[in-house]
Image: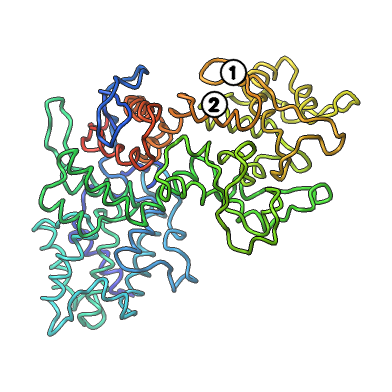
Amino acid sequence: MYTWRSGIIVAATFAAGCIGSVGDDPVDTGPGGESPTGGAGGKPGSPGSPNGGTQCTPGIASTSQIRRLTNAQYDRTVRDLLGVTALKASGNAAPSTLLATDQAGSLTDLGWSAYTSVAEMIAAQVMADPALKGNFLKCTPTGDGAACLHDTIVEFGRRAFRRPLTQAEVARFDAIVAKGPEITPNGAPEEVAEALLYMFLISPSFIQRAEIAEAPDTAGRFALSSHEVASRLSYMLWGTIPDEALNQAADQKQLSTPEQILAQAQRMLEDRRAQQMVAGFHRYYLELGTNTRWDSAQRDTKLFPVFDRSLIPILAEETERLFEHVVFTRGGAFQDFFLSTTAFVNAATAPLYGLDPTNFGADLQEVTLDPTQRPGFLTRVGFLNAYSSYNRTSPILRGVFITKDVLGIDPGTPPPGALETPLPEGAELDTNRKRVDAQTAGAACAACHHNFINPPGFVMEAYDAVGRWQTHEASTNAPIDTVADVLIDGQPVKVASPADLMAKLAASPNAQRQYAQKWVSYAYERDGHPLDSCTVSDLAAKITAGGYTILDLVTDLTQSESFRIRAVELE
């Protein structure tokens, strides 16, 4: 049966206002700068010492001209355009749950079919709900509705495509309206409007974040248009479409200089959506999320009766609250993540911190902890629970995280069979530290474990498997030894306690560079590209100099050449 929906797909061949093919679009990971002069402490956009003292390769990484929206970006875009957060026709599922998973490469026929199915559900839902319909139609159709629908094409198209439509695109969408009686059951204006919305939602100019401006510079690269810069800003800082102020700046070509871009970025960071983006980055930095160590903790409740699986979301939330507090409440810097004594505690987690639960309720409450025991996020019970074993602490898990994720040293893959190495027993092995040290003493393990992984993990033995402070081994009463030589910035450093380790990590140029590197990878949606190394060095140098807030760092990500200039992607 030839319905309006099949007819509109036929009409799409000439009315979509397409740019290229949806199937040609590679997808990078990320949320949603290039400054060869380097940097030092100061306000966003300020210059500094060359490359932060680290060799780098100046240049601009090539990027796809037609990157597809990620699934998270698709959901936020549909939310902010139309107010749709769940599909009634699909059990109130989020729209992206019906799409293919984020992936690089061409879009398959099945993937394209998913986009069309979701678009059909969204269009029908919007037009059936008066509140949602107002997000699409800003006028009331009269007569044949052509005038109102033309205005909708121009107004909604501007928001959906993140740029004004060309005259040719407007004409092609107007042609859809003219064909309304042929492609809808009755040709009623609201039926045609639904078909029109469907067309917008399957257009490559909606599904893709196209960057096709071709204003070359002297190096053969292309400066992004103001509308392309606005799209980069909004998807990097908010993960969604530009707002009216950003659209207006783009329309007036006021996004061509670093200063203009900086002013918008600073404004946008005051929006709640920026807090969500920063939270998303820190989940990435912490490896916190679904199907990670953070949500899969199990404990032997005979040994740790205080542990309950219901604590797991609370432990994750308290960690995220700490990062939000440092960034947005305190206006803090990288160093504060390791030095802050602020924590968020409720009656269930208070005993893990040695606090009286009767002083707390179900909601997390801000407290100040003992600075000798609890500085920084690595001493919070969220991290300590996530990186422990079923019936004991895990110096290896804690040590790997600190070595790899904090200091940026990749210890490599364990040799075959290493994970099956039993934990030794013996009267002389009266602490977990001694047992793990013996377990990893073999020739195949010792080089990585004894030099890199174990030492920071041994310092963290001051906390048991549920994150409580301990000075003696529970099973043997043997004293806990937290002194270790930890490799920091290429040198073994004597560390006496967790507080000592946190202070040294906060001051570590390697840890600072690792944090900057992760920000660049996340914000630019590419993982560790060599041509981003100067940007990383610039940001790291500013962190080292001090007085450089996380919000300064985020806005500086918009100040690089690579943020506003596109390099040609090589075949």
Q: How many numbered discs sit on the rendered protein?
A: 2
Image position of 76 (left or right of 289): left
Type of amino acid under label 1: Val
Callout 2: SS:
helix
Q: Residue at x 64, y 44 (%)?
A: 386
The quarter of the displayed image where residue 135 is located: bottom left
Residue lying farthest to the right in this orientation: 427
Is residue 407 left or right of 439 when viewed as pictured?
Answer: left
- For image coordinates 30% across by 70% down, the residue present is 5
Q: Quadrant of the C terminus?
A: top left
Relative to 179, say whether 362 is above or below: above
Q: Which numbered tag is attached to residue 504?
A: 2
- Distance, label 2 to label 1, CA atoms, is 9 Å
- Residue beneath the point at 18% across and 43% down: 212
Tell me the element at label 1.
strand
From what the image shows, is residue 393 above or below residue 446?
A: below
Confirm or deny contact between disc 2 and disc 1 (CB under 8 A): yes
Q: What residue type is labelled 2?
A: Lys
Observer-nearest of 500 and 5: 500
Local crowd at mark 2 within 10 Å, few (<14), some, or many (≥20)? many
How far from the left and from the top, in percent, is residue 562? 25, 33
Res 320 label: none
Q: Mark 1 points at which residue?
A: 493
The residue closer to the viewer here, 109 or 389, is: 389
Q: Is residue 77 above or below residue 298?
A: below
